[in-house]
Image (tube, rainbow, N blue to C red):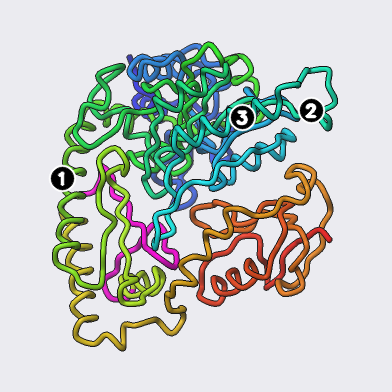
Amino acid sequence: MDSIYSKLKSYGDSDFYPYHMPGHKRKKLTDPLKDIADIDITEIYDFDNLADPTGILKNIQDSLADYLGVEKSYFLVNGSTVGILAAISAVVPTGGKLLLARNAHKSTYNSMCIRDIEPTYIYPNIIEGLNICEAVSADQIAHALAADRMDCSGFDESDDYDIVSRPIDAVIVVSPTYEGRIADIKAIAEIVHSYGIPLIVDEAHGAHLGFVSGTGDNAGGIEGYTKSACQLGADIVIQSLHKTIPAPTQTAVMHINSDLVDIDAVEKYLHVYQTSSPSYVLMAAMEASINYMKEFGADRLSFLRDKYCQLINDINSTCIYIEALPYEKGIQDPGKFIFSGRRAGLTGKALTDILRRDYHLEFEMCVREYVLAMFTVADEADAYDRLRDALISIDKKIQNDATNFKKSLCDFELSQESICLKNVFLKNETVIPLSAAWDMKGEYKSLKDAVGCCANDFIGLYPPGTPILVPGERITSQHVEDLNNYIECGYEVTGVVDGQIRVIE
């Protein structure tokens, strides 16, 4: 069977003239097009249609589904965001309820705004001192669903929702989290299914988990890795290929493996949210990355795990001021390396500035308490060696001259007070329902004048895209103080423009 790339390459080398999109007409008119123009086409004869695949695209998606042991797999060329939007829209009715962690990705909140969905929040536990949210636990899910059913015990579809609230329609769990924390998906799935509702898993950071050793019950065979949610009972699983396997930015897949999910509804909403002009360049790269993982994934993931664990051991056994988050099997996914200079009073940004300026190392994310470095199957030994050597070098410099490294001029020193601030954001006061607040017309006010008002937009640090405030939540002086600190220190805060925030009086 032809691969997408080989078929595109053959077509690009032919003498067929393109009287069709895209507008570059396979001519290399700009520098970026020199690498892709020959294979960048639209849905022409014999190349199938992602919106209604019957040929090569259907075969590739079916092959991936067979490999992972799921009912259906879908290519997503708009990232995991489109999968989250389609999944939630398909399983939660308009005006329904969704159980989610308060630190869910912004795309989950956007889906609730679009569909007028009421959120029910779980507040994850926090790793003290680092302010990293743990994955939600099975006990938290069980407690939330039991409490919800008790509150909704008199619900009937004919009831006025203002009198008796409808029960939760679906659950969404993020695992691995942005920082690599792992949830017990098997236990959570059993609890969720006991209520007859579906479980969606945002596994955007776990596409590699489907390739640890093979398919079905045999998946998860590499020491140190958990199985993919595809094999643990989740009904819908969304994965970003570009995050952890060698695929281009914007590529993702969605898997369905459940009688609780209406596949026709999922496909209907995919047609709504997904572009009608999918990139064949992206799809060819997606297929190639999947084939790479099938052939080399197990060996590369074993290598990653060994180097990752050794790096953590080297830092924690050598450094005095810099520390790495310890690896815990089944709790932390290998590849998300979290380190901190808090023992020296160094914020994550201050530490990142030093590493970028003096060692030319770039990182996924930094916040006050820590820095997040991501390792994938593409990293060789030198990637681990460079970071290890840099951190040990910085630690020695701090030991020799702690005063100069105490804090950066453009940052603020860590204190117990600042370390605790993020916890406050997890339990904000909701004054106006999310979707109602989203649709209301707000006005811009300075941060100091916004205290007491409700947010009219999502406010948070990017990355990772988790909202500190969502529309309808009360803005407090604590929020304003903390947001001002982030802005002054150069962190990217979305939703704040020139010191102003859109609010509802």
Side of 59 where 375 appears, left or right:
left
- Residue 61 in percent (x, y) is at 43, 19
- Residue 244 in percent (x, y) is at 34, 41
Q: What secondary structure is found at the residue carrying circle 2?
A: loop
Foreground mark, 2 or 3, reads: 2
- Residue 439 in percent (x, y) is at 80, 46
Residue for badge 1: 306
Mark 1 vs mark 2, CA separation in Å: 54 Å
Rendered view: 383 above or below 296: below
- Residue 81 in percent (x, y) is at 55, 38
Image quadrant in which the N terminus is located: top left
Residue 378: in magenta span: yes
In the image, 162 versus 2, the foreground residue is 162
Q: What secondary structure is found at the residue carrying circle 1?
A: helix
Residue for badge 2: 164
Q: What secondary structure is found at the residue carrying circle 3?
A: helix
Question: Which amino acid type is shown beneath numbered disc 3?
Answer: Ile
Q: Residues within 10 Å of mark 2 (few under 14, many from 20)?
A: some
Name the residue rendered at 37%, 39% in the picture: 182
- Confirm or deny contact between disc 1 and disc 2 (CB under 8 A): no
Rendered view: 48 above or below 122: above
| Range drawn in magenta | 357-379
Side of 356 where 189 appears, left or right:
right
Residue 173 in view here = yes
Question: Which amino acid type is shown beneath numbered disc 1?
Answer: Asp
Mark 3 vs mark 1, CA separation in Å: 37 Å
Name the residue rendered at 19%, 85% in the picture: 400
